[in-house]
Amino acid sequence: MSRALLAFPGSFSWLQIVRLGLVQTALGAVVVLMTSTINRVMVVELALPAIVPGGLVALHYATQVLRPRWGYGSDVGGRRTPWIVGGMAALCLGGFGAAAATALAETHVAAGLALAVLSFLLVGMGAGAAGTSLLVLLATGVEAGRRGAAATIVWVMMIAGFAVTAPLAGHFLDPFYGGRLMAVSGTVSLIAFAVAVLAVSGIEPRRETSPAAKVEKKPFRAVLAQVLAEPAARRFTLFIFVSMLAYSAQELILEPYAGLVFAMTPGATTKLAGLQHGGVLAGMLFVAGVTVFVGGPILGSLKLWTAVGCALSAAALGAIAFGGPVGPDFPLRAAVAGLGFGNGVYAVAAIGSMMALAGRGGEAERGTRMGVWGAAQGVAFGAGGFLGTLAVDLARLVASEPVYAYAAVFALEAVLFLVALAISLRVEHVTVGRRQNPLTETASFQLNPGFEAR
């Protein structure tokens, strides 16, 4: 019995894909309290330096380098569900621990911060373990033509977790005190864990293996070295890192740019951010709709849409950079909406391509591969925001006006997206059994001699 026959016998239905998306909803519900509510309480109510929550969030991103190890663990065990459930347990425990740490810091700062460090580490590791195995499970069980739509569903449902939890938690946090924060965080964590467990319960089919199929598992370092030694995996890792660096570098500088250069009020810049997020959602839905309802060898190609998304994002960032010196007459809102749309096209196509490429080495490497790319994504996203602000500060030391400093950084981000585009076009993929256009990046479940099931 070949390893290829250990793949899923069928593909997930739309309902099952939505169920798995609920895991991302639960994950987002816990994380949003860490990055928004607890962040604000530390700075405003506790009067701690902003670098404290900033460092804790950076610590959460730093743990993403462990994603390959979590993915390897699920490869060795042969099942992804225990890692999703265990990761969500760690994430929810860490989320509650962070709230407890914040409440403790009101009276014992040192003890509270020590607990916060442990809690944010737990959050990072839990999110990494659950998120990696969830994507691997989707990559294994979603057929080629649905991967773009599946990526959109999962991403949108994560955003739904943000959108639903933040206002509800805010309502129950007033009037604020530490014990109320713990109660709200604990309730959110318990609900999130229950939703995640119910969502994955019974969804992963049992794989029946014959004695001949059981081979000795290679150690983690050997598997990781094997993955990184493959040119296609290295190129895709580099693509993910460069593109996510460009994607996240504008995160913390776009609103200050709009305020300083275009004299927008705080309310106007907040609406601008909402416009960008709306563009992201539109771009994702567009790619999902085209790949599912139109498809074909060209319009169904995730590689094509990845390149288009990078090109649109680069063009929008270039326009934003050019618009500052033009002045108030420049249509900044349209450019920001275009940036969001390009980001959405790129993001969902890149995630779909990641799901397709994860199976190149078979089930024995699927989790490790996804972990490598997840680590590149997490580290780049965490570094992007910091490097974007640092680049602006450095540019302002030599620029005569702030507008030119910001314009230079936006132009640099546009160049990074063009570099990512060039890298993405060089990523190679295995051929599949049915006829496909060489541009098409998704893979079928049909077997081809010498290759693994995708």
Image: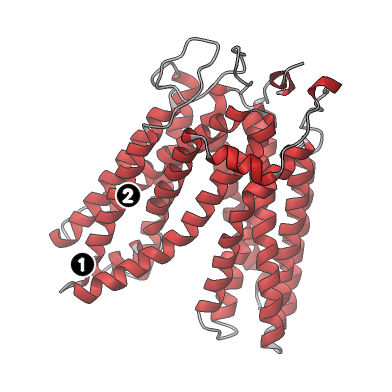
Labelled disc at residue 416 = 2
Residue 282 visible in the current orientation: no
Rendering quarter of residue 18:
top right
- Whether 284 is drawn above or below 99: the answer is above
Q: Residue at coordinates 59% horizontally, 48% vertically from top-left?
A: 158
- Whether 434 is drawn above or below 236: the answer is above
Give the residue type that dot 2 points to: Leu
For the C terminus, which image quadrant? top right
* Residue 384 as seen in the image, left or right of residue 229: left
Tag in front: 1 or 2: 2
* Residue 235 as seen in the image, left or right of residue 197: left
Q: Position of residue 127 (x, y in %)?
A: 66, 54
Residue 144 visible in the current orientation: yes
Labelled disc at residue 403 = 1
- Whether 389 is drawn above or below 340: the answer is below
* Residue 349 as seen in the image, left or right of residue 136: left
Q: Under tag 2, what secondary structure?
A: helix
Q: Nearer the viewer, residue 424 or 148?
A: 424
Q: Nearer the viewer, residue 220 or 65?
A: 220
Local crowd size for mark 2, using a 10 Å CA cut-off: few (<14), some (14–19), many (≥20): many
Local crowd size for mark 1, using a 10 Å CA cut-off: few (<14), some (14–19), many (≥20): many
Rendering quarter of residue 419:
top left
Q: Position of residue 353 (x, y in %)?
A: 50, 32
Q: Residue at coordinates 81% horizontally, 33% vertically from top-left?
A: 202
Q: Residue at coordinates 76% horizontally, 39% vertically from top-left?
A: 76
Q: CA distance from mark 1 to mark 2?
A: 20 Å
Give the residue type that dot 1 points to: Val
Q: Residue furthest bottom?
A: 107
* Residue 162 as seen in the image, left or right of residue 268: right
Q: Nearer the viewer, residue 272 or 361?
A: 361
Q: Position of residue 47 (x, y in %)?
A: 55, 86
Q: Nearer the viewer, residue 427 or 409?
A: 427
